[in-house]
Image (cartoon, rainbow, N blue to C red):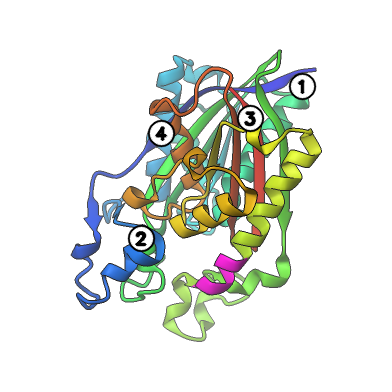
Amino acid sequence: MKNTIISATASYLPENEVLNEQLTQFPADSRPRIAEKTGVLARRIAPEHSCTSDLAIEAGLKCLEKAKFPPEKVQGVVLSTSSPDCVQPPTAARAQAGLGVPQAFAFDINSVCSGSTFGICMADALIRSGRFENILFIAAEMYSKILNPNDFGTTPYFGDGAGAILFEAGVGEKGVLHSCLGTDGHMSEEVGVFGGGTLNPYRRLPNPNSIYLKMNGRAIKEFALKRGCEIIRRLAGETGIDLSDVDCFICHQANVNILKELAAGLNVSFEKFFVNLDRYGNTASASVVIALDEAIEAGMIGEGSLVATVAFGGGLSYGANLIRF
């Protein structure tokens, strides 16, 4: 039976870096709380004229180049985003055109910040079905376009960016070993952009702020800690591994204090947790893929490494993958 191996990873971050002290719309005495609450020191912000698919194209092209993989051989593009170019068509369609892979199917998935773990599972399932030999998975987000710039509860903590993974069919013990996914729809009102769909069409929005991200930070943190530990333990239980055997944990990069509490709750050394949120903030579904790419580049993940990914986000959703490199 075929398994799904990672041939290459890549990431793309906009050049414009915005430091906490540059967020002058907020009082000077409040800005230190950004780092204190989350560990975020800076974020990247995309140019005003750009859109999410532009970031996806950049990350996808870098990934194919690193793998030396001919674009004409790409069979499918799966794109995770919760900040799409528009309601329809799918952002993946514009990305497919920009990548120069007209022979590939392309579609979006949206599980907000958990989209990376869902997308890895989706790519693995498509390849394991035997129908496809490769899938280019991209996670791209541009939250700067869906945030109220004056909302201290959201704007300081998010950034723009994209990551990509080229998956190919393989044999042996490497690859995606297992995935666990979950959703708690009863908490769907805790985070989201609630204006613009069929529930609240633009023509009858209750208030203009409905077009911006709304988030109950306290509820999300409690959910992340509970479900994060739960899904990793479930991943270990269903695969029979011991958490001490995991070489690196690649978690959704939302809050360094959440990551520290996850490590403590799992009785795992925090040194095994890769962290880059201080430089990029929360890049939603792109965060796990960007972190995975940077951990590989930093030498934290190498030949034979056992890696666990975990994410949690809107829906509320949560997921984890176990991958052998």
What quarter of the picture does the C terminus occupy? top right
Q: CA distance from mark 1 to mark 2?
A: 39 Å
Q: Nearer the viewer, mark 2 or mark 4?
A: 4
10 Å crowding of disc 3: few (<14), some (14-19), many (20+): many
Residue 221 shown in magenta: yes
Q: To which residue does mark 2 refer?
A: 144
Helix, strand or loop for disc 3: strand
Residue type at mark 4? Glu
Report the magenta residues as a range.
215-222
Residue type at mark 2? Ser
Q: CA distance from mark 3 to mark 4?
A: 16 Å
Helix, strand or loop for disc 4: helix
What residue lies at 55% left-to-right and 48% top-to-bottom?
Answer: 90
State the mark number for residue 294: 4
State the mark number for residue 280: none
Q: CA distance from mark 3 to mark 2?
A: 31 Å
**Label whose residue precedes the other's in the sequence (3 or 2):** 2
Residue 57 screen position, x and y as percent: 41, 36
Q: CA distance from mark 1 to mark 4?
A: 30 Å
Q: To which residue does mark 1 refer?
A: 130
Residue 42 screen position, x and y as percent: 28, 55
Helix, strand or loop for disc 1: loop
Quarter location, residue 33: bottom left
10 Å crowding of disc 1: few (<14), some (14-19), many (20+): few
Residue 235 screen position, x and y as percent: 73, 41
